[in-house]
Amino acid sequence: MSTRPTLSATTGSQESRFELPLHDPFSLATANEYFGGWTSFGPDQSSLCMAFPVEGWRNSAAVTLQQHGSSSISGEVFGAGEDAGIAWQQALAALSLDSDAAGWHEVGQRDPVIGTLQNSYDFLRPVLFHSPYEAAAAFTIGHRISIQQRRTICQAMAQQMGEGVQVGETTLYAFPRPQVLLELSAFKGVNDVKIQRLHAIAHAALDGLLDRAFLRSQPVERSLEMLRSLPGIGPFFAQGILMRGAGLLDDVTDDEVTKEAVQLAYKLAKLPDQHEVLQVAEAWRPYRMWAAVLLHVWLRREMGGPHQQRKAPASRQK
């Protein structure tokens, strides 16, 4: 289920161009609306641009993507040089477009709750961090501060320490590569303990521990164990790095938000334990993480977030 889609590429002097055929429902605008917050080039958000350090850490890239109806997504990669193909695949992974979605529609047919949400959110797939490295850095920076504060700090780091990549008349800034992050000695809003932890994350990235393909290739518990070995990374952050950084298709996190979403969406009398969540999630295989993400989006967007109950999207499947 994790095969890479077929794509074509042509290379020019400053950018490489790619084309991804779409065989299953997908909306770039919806992904950006609910998750991304990337720079958009049109009012309907059907084209966007993201910048990030390219895995392998030799350079940074900016990737533009534009959707052409239901037929394809085209893209251009700027700044990556010989690593343009890696950067393109990294951008696809951030949108969960690097995975085979042929059976995703069938999950909604088996489970009307998920089917309702698929239709409501244009078959939304999880949107990931650009890499497990960026996920680990973001979770570390964001510890005990608000999401907006974390985003502000990460953006400031990108502008002050990251590489700028020119796209037309716009310069986009990528988060600092691990080699640059190792040079960090002080930064506004980041205390000394967090800086030491960021150094450990940079070392782990350079050693290959925070490589997306590597983390996906390991058994889940092994990946979580390795991530928990990093300073300041406990069980919750380890799950976040693996699920939102590496991106897994078929796993279910053990967290309160998922449990509350399952309780409300499936009209359960009480908050389910993890065993009960996994029983409900059997119908979601082999896209259990994608289904869980839809439930999270519904809970936060339509139910006002955790602990605020309104109407459920559908009755529980009998």
Image (spheres, rainbow, N blue to C red):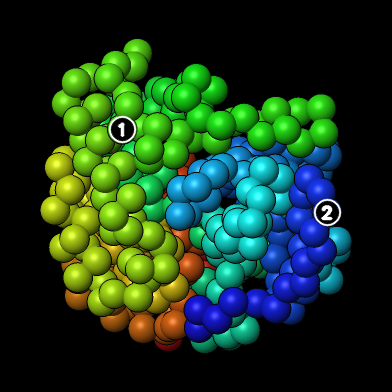
Residue 267, given in percent of the width and then of the height, sits at 37, 66
> In percent of the image, x 20 and y 75: which residue is there?
275
Residue 71, given in percent of the width and then of the height, sits at 83, 71
Q: In the rendered image of this protein, does residue 89 appear above or below residue 165?
A: below
Q: Which one is in front, 211 or 237?
A: 211
> How far apart are the two marked residues, 1 and 2, measured between alpha carbons?
33 Å
In the rendered image, which quarter is residue 288 located in? bottom left
Q: Check contact, mark 1 vs mark 2: CB within 8 A.
A: no
Q: Label 1 belongs to which residue?
A: 182
> In percent of the image, x 14 and y 53: which residue is there?
229
The amino acid type of the residue labelled 2 equals Gly
Q: Secondary structure at mark 2?
A: loop
| Residue 316 visible (yes or no) | no
Q: In the rendered image of this protein, does residue 221 appear above or below residue 27?
A: below
Residue 115, given in percent of the width and then of the height, sits at 58, 74
Describe residue 235's horizontal placement relative to residue 189 as left or right: left
Label drawn at residue 154: none
Describe residue 306's horizontal placement relative to residue 72 as left or right: left
**Label 2: few (<14), some or many (≥20) within 10 Å?**
few
Residue 176, given in percent of the width and then of the height, sits at 45, 34
**Label 1: few (<14), some or many (≥20) within 10 Å?**
some
Describe residue 195's horizontal placement relative to residue 285 as left or right: left
> In percent of the image, x 32 and y 24: which residue is there?
184
Q: Which one is in front, 115 or 124?
A: 124
| Residue 27 visible (yes or no) | yes
The amino acid type of the residue labelled 1 equals Leu
Q: Secondary structure at mark 1?
A: loop
Label drawn at residue 12: 2
Q: Which one is in front, 256 or 133?
A: 133
> In percent of the image, x 55 and y 35: which residue is there?
174
Tell me which numbered mark, 1 or 2, is placed earlier along the sequence. 2
Which of the image's four quarters has the C terminus? bottom left
